Image: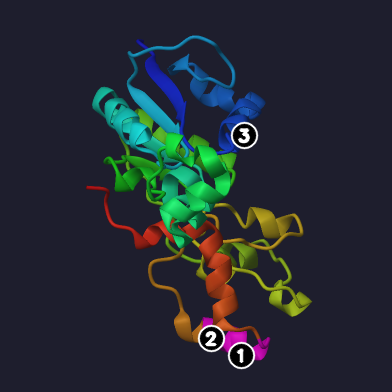
Amino acid sequence: MKKVKVAFFDFTCCEGCQLQVANMGEMLLDVLDLIEVVEFREVMSEKSNDYDVAIVEGSITTSHAVERIKKIRKTAKVLIAYGSCAAIGGINGMKNNFKLKEIREYVYQKDAKHFDTIPTHAVHQVVPVDYTVPGCPVYIPEFIQVLKAALSGLPYNVPDNAVCVECKLNENECMFDKGVTCLGPITRAGCNSWCINNGNICYGCRGMVSNPAENGQKDILEKHKISLEWIENKMNMYNKSRELGELK
């Protein structure tokens, strides 16, 4: 059977999601018989313009990146956006809080004119995306599930219920009851409450649920004397790009 050719690409990101995949070890054996990795900068030097599936990490932050992602989209039969930067704009989206001229001059100072920049966009805001794997970094069991769906031509929808649901199923003590603020009530599930399981909080890296339980969240904030502005600022860390429409 002919193997599906898969290429990994990165844009503006820390490349942590690629490292997550590179380090997944035996879990990748489930799919390696079906795919041929033809480009993956983190693990191989070979490059290819011939691929069926493009797996893209990173947000789109320059005009050059817009041209490049459009070229990748034109070649790939299937495009998977993986990681928060690609899926929702991620931490890079915090740039959108500032005027581009000001932030560019702050970073590059006298050399600012030599560096192109545009507002940070998630991949789906620039080109059509077939599958999405949010998270910072990606949750490997979900990544494998999405990859298998893509290879089989089956749909995959990111869960649209709160991380709290998975947290309850994992019998975790609520972070709010520990006196720590957590974004689980308004963040999309699918990560198996990974961070909370390991003693951390939810930072909202998977994006907001489409219909958050606003009244319930307000009750939580009032009970624990937490301001709405504080929550909004925390959500801003990963989710600023969601305010943008498609890039024209």
- Do the CB atoms of the residues marked 1 and 2 lie less than 8 Å apart? yes
- Judging from the image, what secondary structure is the residue with disc 3 in? helix
Question: Would you call the spot at circle 1 few (<14 residues within 10 Å), some (14-19), or many (20 or more)?
Answer: few
Question: Would you call the spot at circle 2 few (<14 residues within 10 Å), some (14-19), or many (20 or more)?
Answer: some
Residue sitting at x 28%, y 40%: 127
* Whether residue 52 is situated above or below residue 60 in the rendered picture: above
Query: In front here: 95 or 182?
Result: 95
Magenta residues, dominant SS class = helix
- State how many labels appear: 3
Residue sitting at x 35%, y 31%: 64
Q: What residue would you read off at disc 2?
A: 218
Which range is magenta? 217-225
Image coordinates for residue 166, horizontal then vertical, percent:
58, 62
- Judging from the image, what secondary structure is the residue with disc 2 in? helix
98 lies left or right of 65: right
Per the model, the C-alpha gap separating discs 2 and 3 is 35 Å
233 lies left or right of 198: left
Image coordinates for residue 144, horizontal then vertical, percent:
51, 35
Q: Which mark is residue 20?
A: 3
Query: In front here: 60 or 166?
Result: 60
Q: What residue would you read off at disc 1?
A: 222
Q: Amino acid at mark 1?
A: Glu
Q: Amino acid at mark 2?
A: Lys
Q: Amino acid at mark 3?
A: Gln
Per the model, the C-alpha gap separating discs 1 and 2 is 6 Å
Q: Is residue 163 visible?
A: yes
The coloring applied to the image is rainbow
- Do the CB atoms of the residues marked 2 and 3 lie less than 8 Å apart? no
Query: In front here: 243 or 150?
Result: 243
Identify the mark nearer the N-term, 2 or 3. 3
Image coordinates for residue 211, horizontal then vertical, percent:
39, 72
